[in-house]
Amino acid sequence: MTRVLVVDDELLTRQLVRTVLEANDYEVLEAADGATALDLVASQHPDLVLLDVAMPGIDGIEVCRRVNGSCKVVMLTAHDDVATERASRDAGANAFLAKPFSSVELIDRVETMAGA
């Protein structure tokens, strides 16, 4: 079973993503901040991280940089602009998904990344 870490400081976003992923047979871990995300990446070894850009403390760009290829990263963000996407890719993100997104878009992106 593919293990996905969902990192977002918004509880509702984490809950919605968890619901969609679990309905599609993914194992889901959650983190509300960058520090917890880094701890979970190190201890739980997720296959994929869905990572919000704007979070208090360690932001998503820095988390992505520190993950450094140990798993695939999809940036989830309301900041749908070229600069944010470029910064995400420069930090090592494998893909970018702008909020709001549909459950179909989410599953499509997760399936693509999990199978890649």
Image: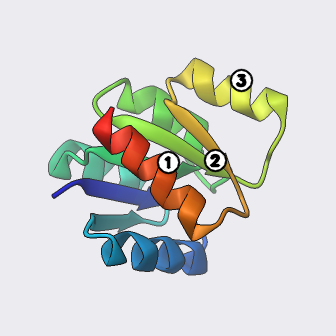
Residue 109 — which label? 1
Left or right for 100, reference 36: right
Residue 89 in the image, given as x and y percentages of width and height: 60, 24
* Residue found at x 41% / y 74%: 18
Near mark 1 (Cα within 10 A), the count class, few <14, some 14-19 or many ≥20, is some
Return the disc, 2 or 3, that comes first in the chain's sequence: 3
Near mark 2 (Cα within 10 A), the count class, few <14, some 14-19 or many ≥20, is many
Instruction: Measure the alpha-carbon separation of dots 2 and 3.
Output: 13 Å
**Which residue reaches farthest top?**
90
Q: Is residue 34 visible?
A: no
Residue type, label 2: Leu
Dot 3 corresponds to which residue?
86
Q: Quadrant of the C terminus?
A: top left
Residue 78 in the image, given as x and y percentages of width and height: 76, 55
- Circle 2 SS class: strand
In which quarter of the view is residue 99 placed?
Answer: bottom right
Instruction: Measure the alpha-carbon separation of dots 3 and 1.
Output: 18 Å
- Circle 1 SS class: helix
Please name which of the two marks, 2 or 3, marks the residue nearer to the observer.
2
Dot 2 corresponds to which residue?
97
